[in-house]
Amino acid sequence: MASVDQYAPCPCGSGQKFKWCCQKVEAFADRANRLAENGQLELALSTLEEGLRKNPGNPWLLTRKAIYLLRQQKLEEAIAALRLVVEKQPNHLGAQALLTRLILGTEGALEGAAQFQRALTAVPPEFRSSLGEVARLVGSYLAESGFFSAGLEHLRLAERLDPKLEEPVASAIQSIASNPVVPIAQKDAFELSPPPPGLQGDALSRFQEALGWANDGLWSAAAAGFETLSANQGAPLDADRNAGLCRLWMGDNGAAVASLRRAIAKMGNTTEA
C-alpha cells in the first residue's frame, strides 16, 4: 500500500496532489529513505539514481538526492540537483526555497537575493506565504553583508508574506535600527511613488502594474517595468525613482544610484521632490 494518501499534497514540495505528481516513484523514495535512516547514504543515493533512470527529472527523487548530498557536505552537487528541478518545474516551492538557502550559504547575500527573486516570481501567489522564512533569512544575510536597506526591506517583506514571523522580524529590524554602525539614511523605510498626476493610458497601466509587482516583493520585475517606462521620452521622474528603490532593495546599489541620478536629472531646476 502507498504510504502517502494519493490526494494529499505531494511530499516533493511541488504543491500538486501526490496522485498526479510523484506517486509512481514512491517505492524508490521510500527505499532510499529507509537506507538513509540507517546511515547508508551511498546506497540511498544509488536507489534514487535507479529511480531517476526510469523517471528522469522527477522532482521528489531529485530533491531527496539534494538532501542526502547535503548530509555528505556535497554542496555543489546538491545545488546542481535542485537546479534541475527548478529548470523543469520553476514553480516547485520546496526546491526553490532550498536552492535559495544553499546559494545564500555558498555564493553570498547578493546571489541569494537574486535567486530569491527568481523563486518569488516563479511560485504561484497562493503559495508565496511559505517563502516568508526564506525572505527573513535573505534579509539577515544582506544586513550582515552591509546591505542594510536591502536587508530591512526583505525583513519587512517576510512579515507581509507570513505574519507569524512578526516577532523574529521585529527583533531583527530593531537590532539593525539600534546598531550605531548602520548609517541613519539606510534605516529609513522609503515609500514608492504613486502614479504622477496626468499619467494616462498605457503608461498609467504599466506604472500601476509595476507598482503591484513591487508591493508583492517582485522587485526585479518591477524595476524592469519602471525602467521600460523611463526609456520613453517625457517619462516621469517617479519611474526612475521607483526603479532605483527596487534595485536598492535587491542590494544592487550601483543600478539604484544610476536610476536615482536619472530622476534627479529630470527634476532640472524645479522643486519637485
Image (spheres, helix red, strand yellow):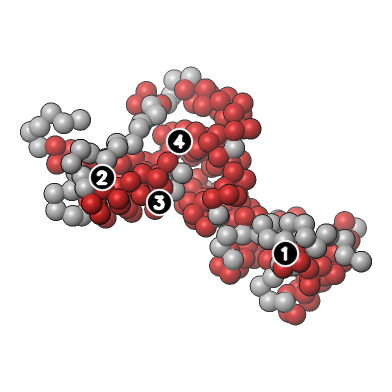
Q: Are marks 3 and 2 in contact (CB under 8 Å)?
A: no
For label 1, the SS is helix
What residue does disc 4 label?
153
Which quarter of the image is occupied by the C terminus? top left
Which of discs 3 and 2 lies nearer the camera? The answer is: 2
Which numbered disc covers residue 261?
none
Q: Residues within 10 Å of mark 2 (few under 14, many from 20)?
A: many
- Residue occupying image coordinates x 50% and y 45%: 109
Residue occupied by mark 2: 239
Where is 178 relative to 64, above or below? above
* In the rendered image, the vertical position of residue 88 relative to residue 128, given as above or below: below
In which quadrant is the N terminus drawn?
bottom right
Question: Residue at the location (54% across, 50% down)?
Answer: 125
Judge left or right: residue 202 versus residue 90. left
Kindly indicate whether the residue at mark 1 contacts the one at mark 4 (C-beta within 8 angstroms): no
**Image quadrant assignment for residue 13:** bottom right
Given the image, on which type of amino acid does mark 4 rest?
Answer: Glu
Q: Residue at x 77, y 57 (%)?
A: 8
Mark 1 packing: few (<14 Cα in 10 Å), some, or many (20+)? many
Relative image position of residue 106 (x, y in whole percent): 57, 52
From mark 4 to mark 1, how far is it between C-alphas?
33 Å
Question: In whole angstroms, how far apart are the C-alphas of marks 3 and 1?
Answer: 29 Å
Residue that lies at the very extreme toward the bottom in this rendered image: 54
Q: Distance between the Cα atoms at labels 3 and 2?
A: 14 Å
For the residues labelled 2 and 1, the Cα–Cα distance comes to 42 Å
Q: Position of residue 99 (x, y in %)?
A: 60, 55
- Which residue, given by chain and number where applicable, does mark 3 sit on? 220
Residue 192 percent across, percent down from the top left: 33, 36
Q: What residue is shown at x 82% (from left), y 67% (from top)?
A: 26
